[in-house]
Image (cartoon, rainbow, N blue to C red):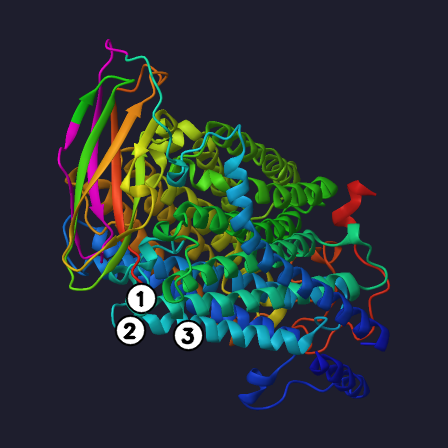
Amino acid sequence: MTDSISRKNLKLARTLLLVAVAMFGFGYALVPIYDVLCEWKWIERDRPDDIKKVSESAHKVDVNREITVEFLTVLNESTPMEFYAEKKQIIVHPGEYHTVNFYAENKTNKEMKSRAIASFSPALISKYFEKIECFCFSEQTFKPRETKKMPMRFVINPEIPEQYKTITLSYTFFDNTER
Amino acid sequence: MSAVVDEHDHDHHADDHHDHGPDKGLLRWVITTNHKDIGTLYLLFALTMFFVGGSMAMVIRAELFEPGLQFVDPAFFNSMTTMHALVMVFGAVMPAFVGLANWQIPLMIGATDMALPRMNNMSFWMLVAGVLLLASTLFMEGGAPNGGWTLYPPLVLQPITVGKALPFAIFSVHLLGISSIMGAINIIATIFNMRAPAMKLMDMPLFVWTWLITAFLLIAVMPVFAGAVTMLLTDKFFHTSFFNAAGGGDPVLYEHIFWFFGHPEVYIMILPTFGVASTIIPVFARKPLFGYASMVWATASIAFLSFIVWAHHMFTVGMPIAGELYFMYATMIIAVPTGVKVFNWTATMWKGAMTFETPMLFSISFVVLFTLGGFTGLMMSIAPSDFQYHDTYFIVAHFHYTLVPASIFILMAAGYFWLPKWTGHMYNEKIGQLHFWLSVISVNILFFPQHFLGLAGMPRRIPDYAVQFADWNMISSVGGFIFGASQLLFLYIVIDTIRGGTGEKVSDEVWEDAGKHGLEWTLPSPVPYHTWTTPPLTVPTEHVLDSH
């Protein structure tokens, strides 16, 4: 190998190494890019953190339609809590306001911070499910052995397409206590 | 980097003593910087891993022979599916192609060696370290990773599925990634800077072209995978929340990042396969490769498309309709350049004076069976149908058709094709043919019924199943056992050929008129330890005739 070729080889190798390092950075850049893309208007969003608080407004109640809303309560595997809804399901008219109480108990003798994450099935109806009050809007702090009654107030927007008859709403409590 | 500069001094030394051969003793294999030695190391390591990963597949097929739990517990079964995939992808198929690249690229382009020989040695030993680290997880408390080779969160982050193995698996992925990035840099530098002056880019054999493009894919996506697993690591141990819903993360994000790597990764395994097939078929059809230039462009287009179709692996995650449609159509477009390739291989054989030695048999069966795997891929690209196929045995059948009778068969073909050149000994053609026929029949008994199982709804990655799936599973397992046992014939042939084979002295060309097809056949057989110390003045251009 002559001098000039080994110099060329090293130069090329360095450039390619830089490309590899840049691609490692690109992997991390995908995290914010993903968030930005999911905010685009034409992409129908169905991510749990889209479920934001809305203020109570007057909807026309559509008494001709009935939608069954089912409630699932789940604990992420190591969360030491008891968590349940007062009702397994309710039948509502679109446009009608309802409040359902959820109960959660801290089973430990320490203060606990935990966060409930919601998810819907079918996923794409989340934008019609308007929540006025929910324990899932923020992290909850539980005193040792405390049981909390947590109301969730919601309305289903009457614009929800005809084909939806049943909505399943699932909450998962994650233990976020600092250790 | 200074190590490589030193290497250049060493090379002057080598030039002064043209005929000096390899060092004596076992240490030669540890410290070697010779591309042929390193190629041999890669190939033998890959062959070993092929049998290790294969044994894991045998465990899987034994457990699935009948419904119910017979031999292993479910967690270990899932470890086997996970480790089988990781070992086969990162330990067998990828290193085998790097081994072929090490042996063949310098021979085919008239270079003395790889561009960065010491880095070459380092990337091999890093691969060994990575695979050993991965294998060590088998003996850990809680067992090897068992959440699938894709390492999806939240599954892979839960203690119940990983035990202590996760950080080891992740560091192993880092090492394997660094190893393949170094290999890729080396290959690009060799192809760009070390070609014989007479060889223009569009004179290069297809194997060199496909590897050049594959190397760029590796540099682009291996770091992204390294990033994704690093995020898993920090989510698990340093309280970050990239994929942790409680902290505002999203597990679906992992799937996007993973498949941004994962889809190009499948082409990393198949593009060199295309290259070897494009090298072997013209020799035995005794015709130049049909459509050389279109082959090059098809390879480049497939590589480009591989970056923009990743989400077809995750149609069921709840993507927006616009996304489903985009990824569906983009995926279907890949069938076009792939179709060009299949057409060209067929047209190369058309009216050729074909003979059917073992490498050609494997290559022809590759064209047929890979196309079959491609068709099922096309079926799954249709987003609404994919909801039915997703995570069933149908996808298992699909990707095994594109990997086993494609990549693996072509690696076998490459072994039969070049072993006589490398060793100077002829392999036993009768046993080779027997190996081919046993393999090609059993591979279909093994994987074809899995299409039926998948369409009937059998999920993948389960140790037990409903009784209606029993018959086809039993047939599939029988095929699997025959296929596994047949590969011992290949092992025998490799060892036998290295030790003298049939005793028949092979000519420099080995195969009739091969000299017209590639530079390597103009060298003596066996290939001397140092080659092309003076670059060839002319290069064979028959394979590129129609583009000139």
Report in which chain the residue with disc 2 lies.
B
The residue positioned 51% from the left and 60% from the top of the image is B227
Check disc 2: other Cα within 10 Å, few if <14, some if 14-19, many if 20+: few
Does residue B492 appear anywhere in the picture? no
Image depth: mark 2 or mark 3 in front: 2
What kind of element bears circle 2? loop
Residue assigned mark 3: B132
- The Cα atoms of the two marked residues, 2 and 1, are separated by 7 Å
- Residue B140, label in figure: 2
The residue positioned 27% from the left and 42% from the top of the image is A135
What kind of element bears circle 3? helix
Amino acid type indicated by mark 2: Met
Magenta span: A62-89
Asked where in the image residue B242 lies, by quadrant, the reply is bottom left
Amino acid type indicated by mark 3: Leu
Residue assigned mark 1: B144
